[in-house]
Each structure stands twice: as structure tokens, then as C-alpha cells.
Amino acid sequence: MRTIAISGSASGIGAATRTMLEADGHTVIGIDLRDAEVTADLSIDDGRHAAVAEVLDRCDGVLDGFVPGAGLGPPVPAGLIAEVNYFGSEVLLAGLRPALAAAGAASVVQIGSNSTTLTPNLPDALVDAFLARDRDTVAAVLDEAGEPFNSAIAYGASKTAITRWCRRHAVTDEWVGQGIRLNVIAPGAVQTPLLKGGDDDPTFGPLTSKLPVPTGRGTPDDIASWITFMLSPAARFACGAVVFVDGGSDAVVRTDDWPRTFSM
């Protein structure tokens, strides 16, 4: 059996994934603000580094898998979304990499979002600023966008940036070269507390209700089933993949926008 860490383990997709993994006999090290083995605030550097240190202690320096799932969305303030969704994942991914490498055949599934392709007019400068760890530019772009819609921009851009981070690192010597498979799952409208926050908001609720979801909205278990598969040896050949599990939303909005070829 394996030892797997999950951030955002106390609710939503993280909690559903935890339940499935434990039912299969795996050990889960949960990271969250409450109801977790590691209680930490991933919106601040001290909390993130403390979480890394405690996970490393609990797994004795060897970790078979990791699911960076902690995330926030509208109508939470844009700055807080930026800190948790991008920097919260990035610091944990980098900090836990040595323990994942020590396992010899580890797997990581970053929770992304179909907002990476469905959020209109995401500023390239904001995504680039995340990847450059340029917090001043992140704050400036979000301030310029203005409330309340800068929280939606922060969500889409932070998920885009962490997805690109994973794609860039997945194929390097430090990751796949050390036996670590790093992939991203991109859920759509799933009935989680994060989505309910948007649904209940007078500004964002009317917008989220209009998102086309051909299958109907998903459940946390729907996504957790995919995550447990992607963590398993059955997904051994997946590396740097972004898997959309969104009920068909991306296919409706971008029907002919994939695939694209490139020139050498």
C-alpha cells in the first residue's frame, strides 16, 4: 500500500479522493485548515513551508503520491485565490519532490480547472507573473482588473499558471527522470463548497448557472475516481497530461479548437 498526501483534504474533491484511497488501503496525509493530519494555512509562506516539513516528517521522507487540491474561487478576494491556488501548490510540489523521488515510482495529480480554457480574456501578463513568482505584478494586474471580477480572473490565471508549471516540470530530469509522474486533472462544474460559493453569490451565481454542462454537473466522487486512476500504476504512461473531466463543457465551448498542429 502507498502513502499519499492531499492538500484540501477536508472537503470537496480532496475529501472524496481521501475516502477512495483509504478504502483501497492506502495511507493518506491530509493537509487543510482543519480536520487533517497537517493543519496549515496555505495562503501564507510560513504555512506552506510548515506543511511541507510536517508531511516530510510524517512520511519519513518517502511519499508515493501527492494531490495538490487546495483551492479557492470567486467570490473569495482575488489576492487570496492567487496565493492558495498558485503559490500554495507550487511550494508544496517543489518541497515534496525529494520525498516523491525517494519512492522511485511516485505519481502526482494537480487539480487544475477547465477555467484555463473557458475564462475569456485572461491576461497573459498575469499568467507570466505567476510563473515568474512576481507577486507585485500579480497584485497590480488584479488591482487594475477591479472587483468583483478580478477574482474570476485570479482563479482562471492561477489555474492556468499551475497547469503550465506542471507541464514544464513533468518532463524534466528532476521529475520524470526521478520516477515521478506529474499530471493535471481539469474538472468543470462539480458540486463542491467552492462552486456553491459562486452559485450563492449575487454577481457570480447568474454566470455559473449559464455554463453549459451536457452531462449535468458532476460530483466530487466523479473527479476522485479519475484522480485515483491517475495515481495508480495503470496510468504509468501518462506524463505531463491535462485531462479534462468537465461534463463536456470544454467540448461545447471549444468544439473545433483542438487539436492543433505545430511547425518544426
Image: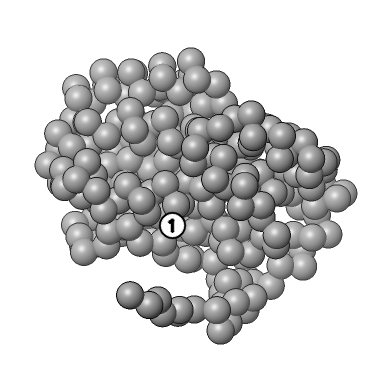
State the residue lying farthest toward the left. 104
Question: Going by the image, does 204 lie left or right of 263?
Answer: right
Judging from the image, the colouring scheme is one colour
Left or right of 242, for residue 125: right
Three-letter code, disc 1: Ile
What x and y, as percent, mark residue 110?
41, 48
Displayed quadrant of residue 253: bottom right
Residue 27 appears in view: no
Identify the residue shown where x is 85% and y is 50%. 203
The residue lying at 20 percent from left, 60 percent from top is 236
Q: Residue at x 12, y 42 (%)?
A: 104
Per the image, the residue denoted by label 1 is: 185
Q: Is residue 108 above or below residue 233?
A: above
The one of 32 and 183 positioned closer to us in this rendering: 183
* Any part of residue 174 in sight: yes
At 20% from the left and 49% from the top, the residue drawn is 176
> Which residue is the extreme one toward the front?
264
